[in-house]
Amino acid sequence: MIISKTVITGIEEPKTSERLPEHALNDFYRAFNSCDLDLMKENWLEGTESSMSNPLGGLKRGWPSIKEVYQRIFNGPAQVYVEFYDYTIHHTDNMFVAVGRERGYFRLDDNSIELQIRTSRTYRLVSGYWKQIHHHGSIDDSGLLQRYQSGVRAAQQSR
């Protein structure tokens, strides 16, 4: 197993048409960090098979429920940025799982929270394209989790 030292931001990496797992991850982070819901939709498997579990959104099943989470983030008053690092990719012919860490920030007005999240993303090869079918994120530090949840609640109330 090789732990990658390459950081994926979705912003600094060149866009490519190659169908490698790293490029699917790059597209996800490009969609997230540029608040591009159309690109995010391309990254996820549409329909009911996809799932997402994170400290803020709970468990969401199916693209319509997952899309709502991203719409709230993208259209909200807070700035959120994450990048993927310290990861491994476990690959078969038709699936891959990326397991690693995200770091970044949540900013709302004068409040800034540095994020540290354990993250895994699972993709399936569908008609020649990698489609995300599952995401799981966890925040180990209970104090950080509480500050982040409070910040997100404040962002939702200020809309």
Image (spheres, grey):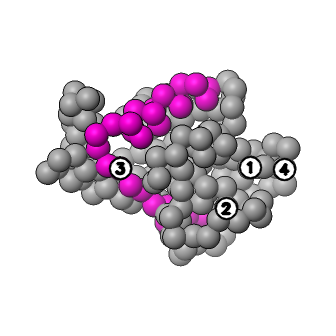
Q: Amino acid at mark 1?
A: Trp
Can I make out residue 130 in this image?
yes
Tell which circle, 3 or 4, labels the residue nearer the N-terminal end.
3
Q: Name the residue carrying label 1.
A: 130
Q: Residue at x 29, y 44 (%)?
A: 78
**Location of residue 152 in the rendering, given as x and y in whole percent from the top left corner:** 28, 37
User: In the rendered structure, does residue 28 fall within the stretch colored magenta?
Assistant: no
Which residue is tagged 3?
80
Q: Are marks 1 and 2 in contact (CB under 8 Å)?
A: yes
Measure how far apart labels 2 and 3 are at the Cα level. 21 Å
User: Mark 1 to mark 4: distance in Å?
Assistant: 7 Å
Looking at numbered disc 3 in the image, what kind of residue is underneath it?
A: Val
SS for callout 4: loop
Label 1 Cα neighbours within 10 Å, binned few <14 / some 14-19 / many ≥20: many
Viewer-side residue, 35 vs 86: 35
Which of disc 2 and disc 4 is earlier in sequence? 2
Kindly indicate whether the residue at mark 2 contacts the one at mark 4 (C-beta within 8 angstroms): no
Q: Which residue does the image show at 45% across and 61% down from the upper left?
A: 83
| CA separation in Å, label 4 and label 2 | 13 Å
